[in-house]
Image: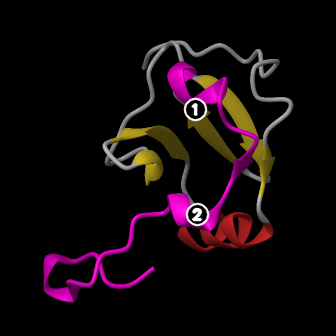
């Protein structure tokens, strides 16, 4: 497992919306904010693994790994960053 910086100084200004905190707690896993063609996106680390250069943000019992490229532009992690899939057969279901 790669080592990650525990220096959250790059994320100290970023707040997590309460509905996102609920989402993270319900899914009981770590997440990563990365870049997509539509802007920043919040994905479980099993889908988008963290990188050594990520900035770490604590979210209760979990960690949000934030791409260094996104961290400088983010002020808040909001629910509109959570992808929405309307294909239950693909195993994603609704948010």
**Number of disc labels:** 2
Picture coordinates of residue 23, whole percent (x, y): 62, 71
Residue range corresponding to the magenta coloring: 68-95
Q: Which residue is mark 2?
A: 28
Residue 89: say if magenta.
yes
Picture coordinates of residue 60, whole percent (x, y): 79, 53
**Res 24 → quadrant:** bottom right
- Is 27 or 15 nearer to us in this picture? 15
**Helix, strand, or loop for circle 2?**
loop
Q: Residues within 10 Å of mark 2 (few under 14, many from 20)?
A: few
Picture coordinates of residue 3, whole percent (x, y): 53, 12
Q: Tell me: residue 50, above or below residue 21.
A: above
Q: Tell me: residue 44, above or below residue 68.
A: below
* Label 2, label 1: how far apart the Cα atoms are: 18 Å
Q: Kindly identify which numbered label has been placed on residue 66.
A: 1
Q: Tell me: residue 49, above or below residue 83.
A: above
Task: Single out the mark in the foreground, 2 or 1.
Answer: 1
Picture coordinates of residue 9, whole percent (x, y): 82, 18
**Helix, strand, or loop for circle 1?**
strand
Q: Identify the residue shown where x is 31% and y is 48%.
A: 47
């Amino acid at each position: 497992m790669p080592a990650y910086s525990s220096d959250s100084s790059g994320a100290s200004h970023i707040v997590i919306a309460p509905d996102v905190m609920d989402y993270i707690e319900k899914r009981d896993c770590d997440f990563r904010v990365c870049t997509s063609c539509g802007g920043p996106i919040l994905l479980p680390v099993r889908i988008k693994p963290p990188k050594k250069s990520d900035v770490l943000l604590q979210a209760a019992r979990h960690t949000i790994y934030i791409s260094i490229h996104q961290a400088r532009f983010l002020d808040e992690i909001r629910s509109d960053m959570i992808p929405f899939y309307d294909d239950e057969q693909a195993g994603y279901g609704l948010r």
